[in-house]
Amino acid sequence: MNKPIFIAEVGVNHNGRISLAKKLISIASKSGADYVKFQSYKTENLVSSTASLAKYQRSKSVKNQYELLKKYELTFLQHQTLIRECKKKKIKFISSPFDLESIDMLKKLKLETIKIPSGEIDNVPYLVHLGKLNKKLIMSTGMSTFNEIKKALKILIKSGTPLKKITVLHCNSQYPTPENEANILTIKYLKKKLGCSIGYSDHTKGYLASTCAVVLGADVIEKHITLNSNSHGPDHKASMHVKNLKEFISSLKNIKNTMGIEEKLLSKKEKINKIYVRKSIFAKKNITKGEKFSKENLITLRPAKFISASKWKKLLKLKSKYNFSEGKPIKI
């Protein structure tokens, strides 16, 4: 079991401010994240000018999706700035492109890995275009049936990206996702059925879902992060506050050590403690030579430095070869 790769998703939680994006990059790096993720799109290529807002996107300041997304759109130069900042902070930059032009931009920026957002999983021209790049791909599967996941993988593979380069993330596209709807056992199912790397994109508020995902073998964990859960924007309420991020990542990456191996072994300290907390057989009262050992004249007491309490039945069949005073350990 390998330590999971952790993606700290900024998404659009930079609120259109590069200074805030840089701050989140720095925190993600210091917290132990492997990647920090953004979103790349041209608003006019992503959404119609009249597309209504989903419930989690609603805001008094915007009328539709176009207005909302335009506020958070990053230019090519801003992408370059953020990539330089990631190199400076020693964390990898990754992004989700939402249109063909943005796929080409990420190719131009020489990204090694590209993230496919859940909303594009049935976008055939998008998948074909991206599959031709033969890049490492991470694909979220929110709102998708198993058959839709298989079809998307088939398109990517046929277009030129082998399965070994693709990681599929189980995902529930509710923002936030109730823990009782996370359905983490899907990870086990996808591992068995798809034969590729599987991870989890976590939109729950807490730690539990991601912890369960890693226990079940998730190779990648993705979690939205924010500096203010009450900030304006579509994703802040489903994001983890950065004050909890370091502890969260550390706990996930230590699960491997906690899980151990599929065998019952004693640790070194357990072997030492065993002497002090297990029991030996002692004389419950004075025992004379030749007297038969019995429940009346024997007792089990700590420590386990003498005849083990596990030998109790065997000892009851014997006679004492020595005199023993009350409270003394039995010797044969």
Image: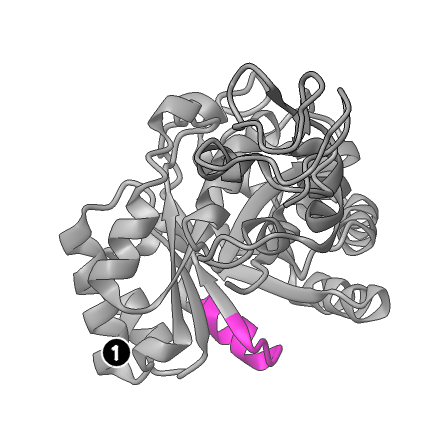
Tell which of 276 and 51 is nearer to you: 276
Magenta segment boundaries in residue numbering: 101-113
Q: Which residue lies furthest to the front in this view?
A: 290
Residue 14 can be seen in this image: no
Q: Where is residue 225 in the image (x, y as percent from the top left)?
A: 66, 39
Determine the image quadrant of residue 300: top right
The residue at 76%/47% (across/down) is 272
> In this rendering, is residue 314 above or below 76?
above
Q: Where is residue 99 in the image (x, y as percent from the top left)?
A: 41, 61
Q: Which of 193 and 30 is in front in this view?
A: 193
The answer to whether residue 37 is above or below residue 246 is below
Q: Farthest residue to the left: give it.
A: 147
Q: Main secondary structure of the magenta part?
A: helix
Q: In which quarter of the image is the C terminus?
A: top right
Say whether residue 110 is left or right of residue 115: right
Is-magenta flag for residue 108? yes
80 to the left or right of 163? right
Residue 310 spot, x, y in % from top left: 51, 38
Q: Residue at x 68, y 20 (%)?
A: 230
Residue displayed at 56% across by 61% down: 95
Q: Is residue 116 left or right of residue 25?
A: left
